[in-house]
Image (cartoon, grey):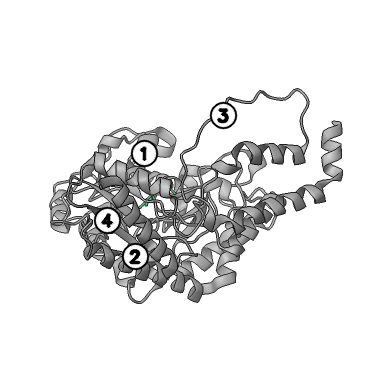
Amino acid sequence: MHPLLKKDKEELSEILAHSLELAQAFLTTLTDRNVAITPHSNSNLNLPEEGLGAKEALQLFMKRYGRGLSASSGARYFGFVTGGATPAALAADWLTSTFDQNATGYGDSVAPLVELEALALLRELFDLPATFSGAFVTGATMSNFTGLALARQWVGKALGYDIAAEGLKKPIKIFAGTAHSSSYKALAMLGMGRNSLEAIPCLSGREAIDVKALTEKLKSQKSPSIVIANAGTVNTVDYDDIAAIAELKTRYPFWLHVDAAFGGFAALSDKTVHLVKGWNQADSITIDAHKWLNVPYDSAMIFTQHENLQVEVFQNAATYLGHPGSEPNFVHRTPENSRRFRALAAWMTLQAYGKAGYQEMVERACDLAKNIGERIKNSDHFTLLAPVSMNGVCFTLVPEATETNINRYLQHLKEDGRVFLTPTTIFGKPAIRISITNWQTTKADIELAWSAMQTAYQRSFS
Ligand SMILES: Cc1ncc(COP(=O)(O)O)c(C=O)c1O
């Protein structure tokens, strides 16, 4: 063994204690850290001929890059749709690396069984029937990829051929109102092509699909198709009428995939559960874990009522990897072969906080989004562009909402450092979005964020 490896092995406890100190220092100063930063690149380091050992390497990293770490896991990172990590999820994630299990299956570890249990807990959390099997993947993009891969296989079978075995022989049509960009990416990766997704008109002033227009489109189809329904769009957190879309399955042949990356959490509250009505009739559902479940990156779930197709598409035939039909064997059900034991963080956080903990988290975020939405509505500086839905607020600047003004404003906001928001375009207008998804966000954070939003406005336009 190389002397440095030998030394680090002997000093492992010290190295871990040092990492704990660094982690604590980071977490205890999270609220004072700039929520987002603009990184400056250093000149590249060369690969050392002789290594430094773990402690020196940790110190070097913190010296070179520590100041460039943002508080993206903190309470006022309202950009994109970003959760943090609950204490239980964080602890579990550390242990995931410590245990370093390969969560594929085939009888060498309990990890796949924990994954199955975590998926069953999640089904309960979202009140999905046991007909849904599931699997963890790296994020909602891969979950959409997996769901659409199953959809592709289903369409092929309906046409009498096996796409997983023979490849795509003719184009497949996909319909959606406002598909998330990751679905286009998934279609590109799946060989169906970005252009195979046809946008169906939405209801006036909404991001939700016009079900009548979809019905007409489905009526005109000669082949089975795929419909992607939204449960929570990124800009206005709008929901398609999933129940009405699901009802169309009795008349037209299509696979229903629901992208509920974060919007699926509407199922947790009596106040919002109606938004996902009918999703239990979907063929596949995407739900992210590193968003509102607040586990560390990278984690999401795919749920499907067609486990047989999962095996047809993702089987990885090699004697040493076990039989595709064997249970549980995720190597034959997901895009990856070797897999991180990412289910542990989800399992731990669900055990730690239960249904009530998550319901409180979701309802608090929705209340806080409403609070900031009210302030925007009553402000001379901003105008709301859509009613506040769930945890999302979409607004723009007054009087002149040009892209240049928005970028200038967001740059000032970023330099202020108390809150981070991201730009978008909605209904053809440059806009700004707020997404409150972190478990720690409270009313006090909204006060701070609001104060920062006023200051940035003054700096930008006076
Ligand atoms: C509705 C929706 N789908 C898919 C994604 C992609 O998620 P990920 O970044 O986890 O791949 C997002 C991310 O914001 C989303 O909001």
Q: Residue 205 carries which label?
A: none
Indicate which disc, 4 or 1, sits on the residue closer to the N terminus: 1
Q: Mark 1 points at which residue?
A: 185
CA distance separating discs 4 and 1:
24 Å
Splitting the image into 4 quarters, where does residue 352 fall? bottom right
Q: What residue type is labelled 1?
A: Lys
Residue 89 percent coordinates (x, y): 59, 60
- Circle 2 sits in a helix, a strand or a loop, which is it? helix
Q: Name the residue under label 2.
A: 369
Q: What residue type is labelled 4?
A: Cys
Q: Which of 256 and 425 is in front in this view?
A: 425
- Circle 3 sits in a helix, a strand or a loop, which is it? loop
Q: Name the residue under label 4.
A: 394
CA distance separating discs 4 and 3:
36 Å
Residue 77 percent coordinates (x, y): 44, 54
Res. 1 visible in picture:
no
Tags 1 and 3 touching, CB below 8 Å: no
Q: Which residue is drawn at 78% across and 25% down?
A: 50
Please, is residue 380 above or below residue 224 in the view? Answer: below
Q: Which mark is residue 42?
A: 3
Q: Which amino acid does label 3 sit on?
A: Asn
